[in-house]
Image (cartoon, coloured by chain):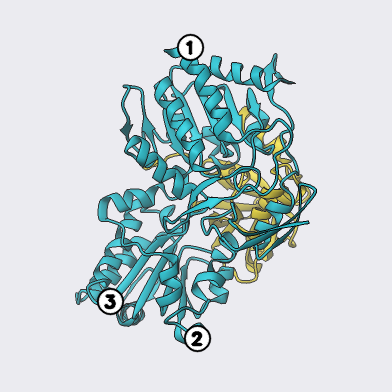
Chain colours: A yellow, B cyan
């Protein structure tokens, strides 16, 4: 795995496809295809030496997850986006600062190329989350 | 073929009430007027369903009758010392009532999904008030609309077309008479469609809102820029806001979930209150699930508090950060979990999932989801607003009646019926 990383702030939220996928079913291909991606700008893809669709490892101090990269033409370097769902929650912290709300926005992450690595299915991801460290 | 008019959409907080649903032989064949998510929801309501109740036996799930599943649920809940009842935002108000009764009789905690979306908005409102208006007012009167940290083109697909781009009584030509501005850290689809996009530095919402307030009040700031904007730009924004005839400030999770959380919302409310000295402004959170606003309302009616309510002393107590779902799970405090129309396994941080997987979960949901994979008891329920009726609250607080448009699958009951059966079982055991 290439250890040249790109530091960024990760944010999450709803997308149209994520909403549709959710209504089709959490086990549907549409849902999996939409929530297991990380959207980023073209410079980040270039620095990582990957093409859109290659897998990346997203690492924060709370955990790591492998997802597919996706080009966001409107994005600027430094901010990446993963649609809300189980994949982004692998790198989300749980401290709510006495508010009840974890930090779902602006998570400091480093992104590495993980070309050739497989993205876990929703079931495999859940298994890893509850069984892993 | 039957055609049902004025059907309310049970997806997002817009609760669009103009759907026309075509039905042939108890099958939905067409959803006219709905957005693409609404169409997907109505036309695929039978996809990926939980087909029958299941209970856990020796690490596997076995098919059970509804009575057996209810009995197992009652046994788990009656034996729990610290039950967490959670969810509620994707079901109708009558189901909420039964959930509060279960929390009360078991001395448990009841929290709804707003604790991980606009719970901080409520904390901000409790601090500073609620300068609210209705969505109809926005449509008929507004000449300046701000979306702050919100992306309605994706999360509330008809919000703009129904309320902020539509012509109204006093805004006949919205294209020329109304401005739509987007404040965000990234150029979203909504920003693309807006008249003005203001890119702000991540995590600077609180600073920027307070700087806007200071400038509105005539203070001089001893800095060159705030939140990535020059003082000249901030002054220009504030002047336009002050000169608007009617302004609407919509905000999303980009404000309520970002650094500063309820303080961000507090600052936005104070800014809107200050603007109301000069003109009329209306502030509204973009509520996500169709009845999350209703969950806050029914919780307040029944318990006195909008979320994070603890009944362990026999009377309701409120403390976000203590009785909120993620905190209870991370502290490994709850020993049973009653999940109603939500999917915490998909939406909670991984650290919270570890404890969730260790305790018995009773899951009420129409569809398979990540929580159903680890639940000890799964009970399928009818989809509110499609397979059962009920009431829900729109993002501006307006209550709307959800219609039943088709019969649920055989043997599947609404959440309220299943919860009532669980409560009746508990009453026999606990009284």
Which of the two labelled residues, at mark 1 and mark 3, occupies the earlier sequence position? 3
* First reached walking from the N terminus: tag 2 or tag 3: 2
The numbered dot on residue B429 is: 1
Instruction: Classify mark 3: residues with Cα within 10 Å, few (<14), some (14-19) or many (20+).
Output: some
Q: Residues within 10 Å of mark 2 (few under 14, many from 20)?
A: few
| Along the line of sight, the residue nearer the viewer: B285 or A53 | B285
| Residue B394 seen from this side | yes
Q: Is residue B286 above or below residue B213?
A: above
Q: Is residue A39 left or right of residue B170?
A: right
Estimate the x, y position of residue B35 in percent, counting from the top left: 65, 63
User: Which residue appears farthest toward the front when viewing the image?
Assistant: B2
Q: Residue at x 52, y 84 (%)?
A: B175
Q: Are the two marked residues, 1 and 2, in contact with CB atoms closer than 8 angstroms?
A: no
B329 relative to B277 in the view: left or right: right
The quarter in which the C terminus of chain B is drawn is: top left
Residue B307 rendering spot, x and y as whole percentages: 39, 40
* Relative image position of residue B331 (x, y in whole percent): 43, 28
Pick the residue in front: B6 or B309: B6
Question: Alpha carbon of mark 1 to alpha carbon of mark 3: how far?
Answer: 58 Å
Q: Which residue is mark 2?
A: B173
**Residue placed at 46% from the left, 63% from the top?**
B149
> Which residue is under mark 3?
B279
C-alpha span from label 1 to label 2: 63 Å
What subunit carries mark 3?
Answer: B
* Label 2 residue SS: loop
* Quarter of the rendering containing residue B277: bottom left
Marks 2 and 3 sit apart, C-alpha to C-alpha, by 21 Å
Residue B20, picture quadrant: bottom right
């Amino acid at each position: 795995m290439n250890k040249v990383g790109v530091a960024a702030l990760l944010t999450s939220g709803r997308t149209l496809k994520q909403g549709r996928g959710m209504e089709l079913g959490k086990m549907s291909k549409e849902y999996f295809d939409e929530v297991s991606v990380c959207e980023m700008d073209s410079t980040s893809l270039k620095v990582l030496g990957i093409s859109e669709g290659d897998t990346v490892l997203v690492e924060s101090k709370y955990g790591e997850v492998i997802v597919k990269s996706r080009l966001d033409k409107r994005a600027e370097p430094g901010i990446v986006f993963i649609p809300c769902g189980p994949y982004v929650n692998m790198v989300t912290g749980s401290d709510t600062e006495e508010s009840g709300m974890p930090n779902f926005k602006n998570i400091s992450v480093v992104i590495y190329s993980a070309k050739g690595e497989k993205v876990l299915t929703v079931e495999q991801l859940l298994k890893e989350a509850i069984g892993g460290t | 073929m039957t055609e049902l008019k004025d059907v309310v959409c049970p997806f997002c907080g817009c609760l669009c009430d103009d759907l026309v649903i075509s039905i042939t032989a108890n099958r939905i064949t067409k959803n006219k007027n709905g957005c693409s998510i609404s169409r997907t929801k109505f036309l695929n309501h039978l996809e990926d369903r939980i087909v029958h109740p299941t209970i856990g036996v020796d690490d596997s799930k076995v098919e059970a009758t509804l009575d057996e599943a209810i009995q197992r649920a009652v046994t788990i809940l009656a034996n729990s010392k610290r039950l967490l009842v959670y969810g509620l935002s994707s079901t109708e108000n009558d189901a909420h009532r039964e959930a509060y009764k279960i929390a009360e009789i078991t001395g448990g905690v009841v929290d709804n999904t707003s604790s991980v979306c606009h719970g901080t908005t409520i904390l901000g409102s409790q601090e500073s008030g609620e300068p609210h208006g209705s969505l109809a007012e926005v449509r008929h009167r507004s000449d300046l609309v701000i979306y702050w940290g919100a992306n309605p083109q994706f999360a509330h697909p008809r919000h703009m077309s129904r309320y902020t781009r539509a012509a109204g009584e006093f805004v006949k030509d919205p294209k020329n008479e109304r401005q739509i501005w987007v404040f965000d850290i990234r150029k979203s689809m909504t920003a693309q469609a807006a008249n003005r996009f203001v890119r702000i530095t991540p995590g600077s919402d609180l600073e920027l809102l307070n700087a806007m307030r200071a400038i509105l009040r005539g203070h001089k700031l001893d800095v060159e820029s705030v939140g990535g904007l020059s003082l000249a730009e901030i002054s220009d924004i504030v002047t336009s806001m002050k000169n608007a005839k009617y302004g609407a400030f919509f905000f999303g999770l980009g404000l309520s979930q970002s650094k500063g959380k309820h303080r961000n919302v507090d600052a936005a409310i104070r800014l809107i209150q200050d603007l109301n000295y000069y003109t009329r402004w209306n502030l509204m959170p973009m509520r996500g699930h169709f009845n999350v606003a209703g969950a806050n309302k029914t919780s307040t009616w029944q318990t006195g508090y909008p979320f994070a309510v603890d009944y362990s002393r026999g009377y309701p107590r409120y403390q976000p950060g203590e009785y909120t779902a993620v905190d209870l799970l991370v502290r490994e405090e709850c020993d049973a979990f009653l999940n109603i129309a939500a999917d915490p396994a998909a939406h909670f941080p991984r650290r919270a999932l570890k404890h969730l997987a260790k305790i018995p979960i009773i899951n009420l949901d129409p569809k398979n989801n990540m929580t159903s994979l680890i639940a000890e008891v799964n009970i399928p329920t009818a989809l509110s607003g499609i397979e059962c009726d009920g009431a829900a609250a729109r993002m501006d607080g307006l209550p709307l009646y959800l219609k039943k448009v088709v019969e649920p699958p055989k043997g599947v009951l609404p959440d309220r019926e299943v919860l009532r059966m669980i409560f009746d079982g508990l009453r026999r055991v606990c009284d």
